């Protein structure tokens, strides 16, 4: 009987000890959740902004972007403006690559991004010269030079430089490959 009383005394003590850490764990979790939700609300309120403050900050960003664009156009540096330029389409190019043992072909379609519409008008007046410069450049490349990503980026830069060299004032920002097939 003494053993039964001792067991009864130990049981309530053992049961109450784990209940306290579980309650503490739940309380700490609820408090952490409250702080997390409160912190997220404050971050959205102050950093995200809604209503008039968001509209005014958006207007300030648009004004700053417009100033940067006009400044870069005034400087005449291609590729500095935030807004995309006009696109000038060229007919597809099909050339033999400079591989000597094998005959390889490259089919390439380009779009040129230009600063202004005036540059596009000048480009359309010089299409035979532009096509000739690009054909000579493409036919001088071998398959190993144009298959890699680095080779394509280099080819894009060389095309941009050659076309800008034909213009009175450089106005081509970059060239975009819309079709690139090597066979």
Image (cartoon, rainbow, N blue to C red):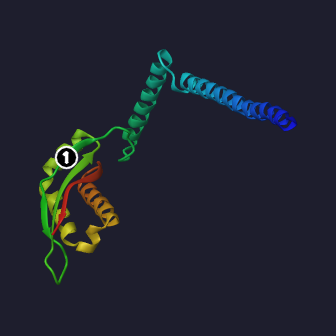
Residue 94, image x, y percentages: 12, 64
Task: Give the quadrant of the N terminus.
Answer: top right
* Residue 147 found in image quarter: bottom left
111 or 13, which is in the foreground?
A: 13
65 or 151, which is in the foreground?
A: 151
Residue 58, image x, y percentages: 45, 25
85 or 150, which is in the foreground?
A: 150
Name above or below for residue 160 compared with residue 16. Answer: below
* Residue 103 found in image quarter: bottom left
Task: Give the quadrant of the C terminus.
Answer: bottom left
Residue hosting label 1? 88
Residue 93, image x, y percentages: 13, 61
Task: Work out which residue is located at the far front of the displayed protein and give it.
Answer: 1
Left or right of 135? Residue 31 is right
Tally of numbered discs: 1
Count neighbours of disc 1 (C-alpha within 10 A) and say few if under 14, some if 14 to 19, many if 20 or more: some
Residue 105, image x, y percentages: 14, 70
Left or right of 146? Residue 73 is right
Disc 1 secondary structure class: strand
Task: Work out which residue is located at the far right of the displayed protein and give it.
Answer: 2
Left or right of 143? Residue 105 is left
Name above or below for residue 181 compared with residue 11. Answer: below
Left or right of 17? Residue 32 is left
Task: Work out which residue is located at the far bottom of the displayed protein and give it.
Answer: 101
Name above or below for residue 129 compared with residue 72. Answer: below
Name above or below for residue 72 compared with residue 170. Answer: above
């Amino acid at each position: 009987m003494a053993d039964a009383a001792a067991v009864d005394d130990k049981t309530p003590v053992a049961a109450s000890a784990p209940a306290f850490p579980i309650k503490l764990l739940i309380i700490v979790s609820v408090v952490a959740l409250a702080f997390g939700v409160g912190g997220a609300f404050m971050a959205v309120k102050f950093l995200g902004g809604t209503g008039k403050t968001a509209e005014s900050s958006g207007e300030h960003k648009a004004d700053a972007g417009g100033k940067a664009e006009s400044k870069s156009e005034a400087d005449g540096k291609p590729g500095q403006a935030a807004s995309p330029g006009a696109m000038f389409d060229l007919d597809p190019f099909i050339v033999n690559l400079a591989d000597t043992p094998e005959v390889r072909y490259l089919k390439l379609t380009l779009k040129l991004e230009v600063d202004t519409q005036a540059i596009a008008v000048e480009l359309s007046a010089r299409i035979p010269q532009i096509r000739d410069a690009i054909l000579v450049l493409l036919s001088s490349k071998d398959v190993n030079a144009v298959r890699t990503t680095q080779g394509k980026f280099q080819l894009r830069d060389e095309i941009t430089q050659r076309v800008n060299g034909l213009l009175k004032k450089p106005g081509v920002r970059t060239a975009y490959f819309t079709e690139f097939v090597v066979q």
